[in-house]
Amino acid sequence: MPKANVLLLGAGAVGARAARQLVEADDVARVHIADPNGDRRAAVVRSTGDKARDAGVDGRDVRGRIDAVLLAGPVGTHLAPARDHLRQGRVVVSCSDGVDDAKALLDLGPEAEARGTRVVVGAGFSPGLSDVLVRHAARRFEVVDEVHVARSGTGGPACARAHHKALTGWSMDWRDGGWQQRRSGSGRELCWFPDPLGAQDCYRATLPDPILLVPELPGVDRVTARLAATRRDRLTAHLPMLRRPHPEGLVGAARVEVRGRRQGIQDVVVFGILDRPAVAAGATAALALRWALEGRLPAGAHGLAAIEDSTAFLAALAEVGIKAAVFEGSAV
Amino acid sequence: MTLLRRAAVALGIAGVVAAVLRLRGTGGTPPQQGGWRELSGPELQ
């Protein structure tokens, strides 16, 4: 199989990390990096190594074959390039955690299937790595009844803005075979993340996780997603951000709680991940792109819960230092 | 006028109570036993 040429759109915190993972891979020949911010783009190209190329503002001027496109720009900028590149039969991987992006990208499924290619939706930290953890937990059950995802922390500034916005609007909960809209910022629940984060109050939020998980878990009764937030986050959610977000968030975590049955016995499995969200998102997106190119993800448009061999995916991430954990004990 | 003033005070008190309820307290009880362990070995093979 020839080595792949990849176009990366977005050289922010996640894009830069994904670029570094991609240039390390033996099966990637070139990484063309595009970003509207010329200084940031140049800095990432410079620091990424010999395989990296400057692809300008949007990568339209890249000459030669492009096999796959990794969309790592801000939420709301993914659909148009996804459509364009899908039309050319390329693998498309999106890191967006926006609900509208996720819905629109999933709608590209029939076209992707017809073209025999893949659109990977929500291939970041959460959704993304959290979806792989859900699949990994679901494999332990014959029937999956409930999935509850919670996330703490943010990647780059665009992710921090999306986090701020997610506490307003409406969350989509899957319950008993139908969607329920609940107000974001409600439904406080204490979620126990891997140490040192520990217990954090989490709230319903405008997150795409249930939209990505439900199609991959036929028969599931309940799917919810929550976001860790402080009192200040909730109080100021409806206001503009009071100060500029940090260039990159600190350590974050994701936690998935999967309830199901095997041999008629109900049980619960809790998996978690602790890392810098941008680092984990970049590694997850890069690996998802390589797997999609190898045909190890199903054709069409799917989230990463569609992955069959979650064990190998998690093992590959562990090799680059992204290590999942299991909660053992009373899963409250 | 008095009615309006009373209604405004009532709404104000209700708002303060709602804000206190929304911002105080926690969402549950932390686990009393157990902990996190990295996946390794056969769990990743």
Image (cartoon, rainbow, N blue to C red):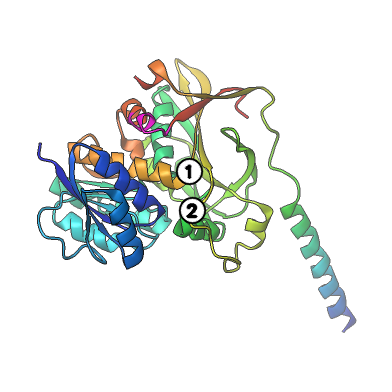
Chain of the residue under the numbered disc 2 shown in the image: A
Residue A290 vs A264, above or below: the answer is below
Q: Quadrant of residue B10?
A: bottom right
List the single residue furthest toward the right.
B2
Find the distance from the CA under tag 1 to the CA under tag 2. Answer: 9 Å
Quadrant where the C terminus of chain A sits is top right
Q: Residue at x 61, y 54 (%)?
A: A185
Q: Which mark is residue A198?
A: none
Quadrant where the N terminus of chain A sits is top left
Q: Residue at x 39, y 60 (%)?
A: A74
Could you tell me the amino acid type at mark 1? Arg
Give how far across and how far down residue B42 sits, in percent. Answer: 39, 16
Q: Is residue A95 visible?
A: no
Q: Residue at x 36, y 45 (%)?
A: A282
Q: Residue at x 25, y 61 (%)?
A: A81
Count up the numbered dots. 2
Quick one: label 1, few (<14), some, or many (20+) residues within 10 Å?
many
Residue for badge 1 = A276
Give how far across and how far down residue B3 sits, in percent. Answer: 87, 78
- Asked if residue A153 lies left or right of residue A118, the reply is right
Q: Is residue A236 visible?
A: yes
Give how far across and how far down residue A124 sits, in percent. Answer: 39, 46
Label 2 secondary element: loop
Residue B27 vs residue A219, the one in the foreground: B27
- Boundaries of the magenta span: A316-322
Residue for badge 2 = A248
